[in-house]
Every structure is written in structure tokens, then in C-alpha cells.
Image: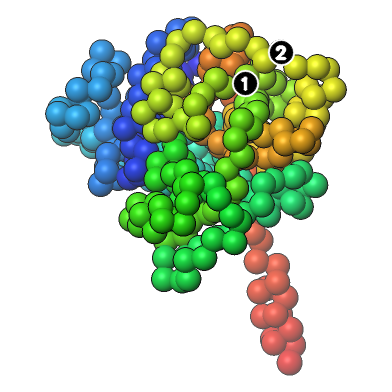
Amino acid sequence: MTLAILFGGSSFEHEISIVSAITLKKKLVRNELLFIFMDKDREFYLIDAEKMKSTTFSSGEYKKARKLSLGAGGFAVGGLLGSKPLSFDVLLNLIHGRDGEDGKVAALMTFFGIPFIGPRLEGSVLSYNKLHTKLLARELGIDTLKYRVLSKDGERRNELGYPVIVKPVHLGSSIGVSVVRSESELDYALDVAFELDDQVLLEPFVEGIVEYNLAGCKTSLWELSLIEEPQKEEFLDFDKKYMDFSRENRVCEAVIDAELREELEAAFKRIYDPLFRGSLIRCDFFVVEGRVHLNEINPIPGSMAHYLFGDFEEVLERLAAHLPREKEIDVDYRYIHSIQSAKGKA
């Protein structure tokens, strides 16, 4: 299988996507890999495998690479004798945040008929927006922490008490996230968050809360990872989280009883199917007073959460063979013909 990895994007998480792509280059060794970089201006470049290092992008050296166009038939490489189609079997959407997780890439790939691993449009919309994720969980009968949403131009009221955690609604990777312990700290934390987003989510910050992470997908069967209990301080900030996701070794499995494992897996399956078919996602759960709560859905987890699987590449191969297909619609203009026929009779 030839797998094209699409990474970069116009996003606050642009650099994290680069880290993820470099990490997967080391993990995916059985299949041929192509690397398609989307820069901040949303231009596409075909990056040689030996150039897959951070300085290629930070120095701007990537601009010397072959430029790609995207249109009917997929990606193409330009040349003196015209464009040549870029051939691959499946594309892996590895763009974190805006562009990759908000539905733009999903819409482009679907529109141009490019088979891809990643969240489809509906799943992207509901997981990219933290408020929508809360509403989805409620509809599925899964608990979440209490929350309030504040708007940039609205009133700054915290009705949840302290401490409280402040999160931009449309960002991941712990960007702009703060723990606020008193009213005097709230305005500054909101100023930081509102620099990044027009909406902010407030949640109670629960000391010592237990978190569990579970990743997976559905092929001909359920492909569920081990369950991890992240060892962290108050929360994983941007730097700690992605130094962590660039790791190459598998993590240790959480020591939990069979009943909790079943609850976490059942919640994951309700979230995933059918909304996220075709993607490999990670769900982060809290357990509060013995009840499972959804914290967030990661539709394109850092480095695809490879560290939670025994043979991550094998899971991707099976997922690539079980991607959803858009229904073909036969347009025969029967309705218009019937109208024209009726008018003729009149």
C-alpha cells in the first residue's frame, strides 16, 4: 500500500502536525509513504522522505520541494510537460486543528473522490467544537463535566466557582488552556484564551481527577487500543503533551477492573459508530465519583496515538481497507423531462 500523509495546515497546531508526521515516518515501515505538506498559505508540497525533519519546515527549505495542485482526480505534480497525477492508495489526514479537524480537508477529499483515513465532515464539526462535543455526549447518554460558554464580546461571569479551567472552544493541544483559582486570575486567563478564539469553555477543575485515554476504530471488527491512565500534573500543557506524543515506545496499560474497562469501551463505541467511521480517534474520559465522563474527542490524535497499540501499522492497514464510500447518485433528469413532457401536452 502507498500511503500519502497530509500534514501542516493553517492552524495554531501546525508545528504539532509536523512532529506527528516525523514520528509516523519512524513507525510506519512496511508501506511506501508519500509526504504532502500544506503550508500556512495552504499551498501543497511533496516532501522527500529524507527531508522529513523539523528544520526543513522551520527554515522554509520545503519551498524548494515539488509543488502540488489539487483538483479533479486528486493531487498532481507540475512539470514542463504538464501535470502528472500523484499516485497513492490512501491519504492519511494528519493535520491537527483548523483545516484538518474542522472539516475542510474532509470536504476536499470527499469532493475530489480521494480515499482517506480521517474524520468525515459531520464528525469533524462535532468534535472540533468543544460545545458541540458536549451536546453530542448528552445525546448519546454520556456524562460530561458541568460547563459554561463565554463569548468574546459577552459578559465575563463564572457561575461554576473556583478553581475553574478555561479552554478555547475551537482549539486542541492544550493551547490557551488555564487553571484559574480565584476571581482575580479570571480576566487574564480569558484575555489569553480570547486572543486565540471567540468562544471559551469554562469547566470546574477537579483536583486529583482520574483520566483514561482510549483510541481505536472500526474495520470488520472493533480495533481498540489499550487504556492509558496518563500520569500528569494539573494538566498536560502544549509542550509536555507533544513531547509525550512524539514518543516511540508503547505505554503501560492502566490497572482497572473489568467493569470500568467495559464502561469505557462501551462509551467509546457509542461515540465512534457511525459518526467517525473511516477515522482512528482517541477519546479522553474522566471518572468522577465512579461515573464515566467524556472530556474530549481527538479526531486526529497526536501521532495518531500509535503508542496505545501493539501493531499500529497493521491497524491502519485494516482501516484503509474498510473506508466508507460516498453513495453514487445517478442523475437522469427524469423530473425535468417529465415537466417538459407535461408542458408539451399542455
Q: Where's residue 115, x and y in %?
A: 53, 34
Q: Is residue 49 visible?
A: yes
Which mark is drawn over residue 156? none
Q: CA distance from mark 1 to mark 2?
A: 8 Å
In the displayed structure, would residue 182 be above or below residue 26? below
| Between discs 1 and 2, the one toward the N terminus | 1
Q: Where's residue 217, x and y in %?
A: 66, 27
The colour scheme of the drawn protein is rainbow
Question: What residue appears at the point 75 percent right and 17 percent down from the top-left corner?
Answer: 256
Question: What residue appears at the point 39 percent right and 33 percent down from the top-left corner?
Answer: 238
Residue at the limit of the structure toward the bottom, as seen here: 346
> Looking at the picture, which amino acid does disc 2 mark?
Val
Question: What residue appears at the point 70 percent right and 67 percent down from the top-left corner?
Answer: 334
Q: Quadrant of residue 42?
A: top left
Task: Return the residue nearer the eye: 336 or 223.
Answer: 223
- Callouts 1 and 2 close, C-beta under 8 Å: yes
Question: What residue appears at the point 69 percent right and 86 percent down from the top-left corner?
Answer: 344
Q: Quadrant of residue 211?
A: top right
> Looking at the picture, which amino acid does disc 1 mark?
Glu
Q: Is residue 322 visible?
A: no
Is 146 displayed left or right of 108 in the figure? Answer: right
Quarter that holds the C terminus? bottom right
Disc 2 residue crowd, few under 14, some 14–19, many 20+, Cα 10 Å = few
Task: Return the residue nearer the eye: 225 or 343.
Answer: 225
Residue with the mark numbered 2: 255
Q: Where's residue 95, x and y in %?
A: 42, 36
Which mark is drawn over residue 229? 1
Secondary element under disc 2, as helix, strand or loop, is loop
In the displayed structure, would residue 73 be above or below residue 340? above
Q: Where's residue 152, x and y in %?
A: 42, 65
In the displayed structure, would residue 255 be above or below residue 242? above
Task: Return the residue nearer the eye: 27 or 256.
Answer: 256
